[in-house]
Structures are given as C-alpha cells and as structure tokens.
Amino acid sequence: MSVPRKKTLAFGLVTLALALPACGADIAAGEKKANEVCAACHGPDGNKPIAPEYPKLGGQHRDYLAKTLKDYKSGARTNPIMAGQAQALTNKEIEDLAAYYASRPSTLVTKR
C-alpha cells in the first residue's frame, strides 16, 4: 500500500522540526553568527554567494553543514578561507550555524 505524498511530506516536516531542537541548536544564535561572519561571502540567507564558486548554504542538510564545518576545523577538509573561519567557531556555534542554514529555504535547482 502506498502512502499519499501529502502524508509523507507532512511526516518529513514534523520529523525535521523535532530533530532541530534535539540537536541542541539555536537557530537565532546561528542567524546572528551567520550575519556577523558568513554573510559576507555566502549572502544574508546563504543563498546569494558573492562569487559563483562559493556554495549556496540555504536549505542544505543540517548534518552535512555541521560535518563540513567540523572537517574544515580539523583539517580533514582543506580550504584556506574556510579553515580559518572554522577555526574560530566553537562546536555549539557550528551546530547553531548548521541549524540556521538548514532552516532557510533552498534556491538550489537540478539542471538536466
């Protein structure tokens, strides 16, 4: 028996809403830090990077964003600009930023 698309979408949204507070993230604190540090390159909501090679962050998965920042911080992922930015962040700030950008609408599109 297939589940109607509306029910699946609603379940996914409820799951996401419940998962964000569970990770201890503070979206408002993430927004504040994003406006202070990240917006200069990635745009105010993470969807308007100043250069095409900078990624759009809005709407990305929270766990992906957090892992990426932690990898820049540890040196597991290299980029001179992001390594320097990530070094200054605490684990809490990383979780807050990831939750904030995950909560933003995505402007990503699939080109076929």
Image: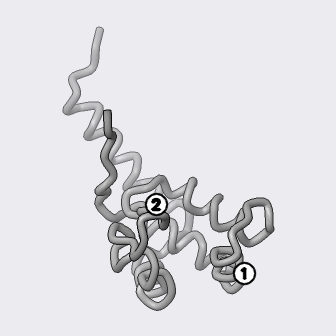
Hey, which residue is sitting farthest front in the picture?
A: 52
Q: Is residue 37 above or below residue 48?
A: below
Which residue does the image show at 73% across and 61% down from the upper left?
Answer: 77
What is the count of numbered marks?
2
Q: Residue at x 21, y 23 (%)?
A: 4
- In three-dimensional space, the C-alpha distance between marks 2 and 1, rounded to whole angstroms, equals 24 Å
Element under disc 1: helix
Residue assigned mark 2: 20
Q: Position of residue 43 (x, y in %)?
A: 37, 77
- Amino acid type, label 2: Leu
- Crowd band around label 1 with a 10 angstrom C-alpha radius: few (<14), some (14–19), many (20+): some
For the point 29% across and 56% down, the residue is 107
At label 1, the amino acid type is Gln
Reply above or below: 71 against 49: above
Seen in the image, is 49 located left or right of residue 83? left
The residue wearing badge 1 is: 87
Q: Secondary structure at mark 2?
A: helix
Q: Position of residue 56 (x, y in %)?
A: 41, 62
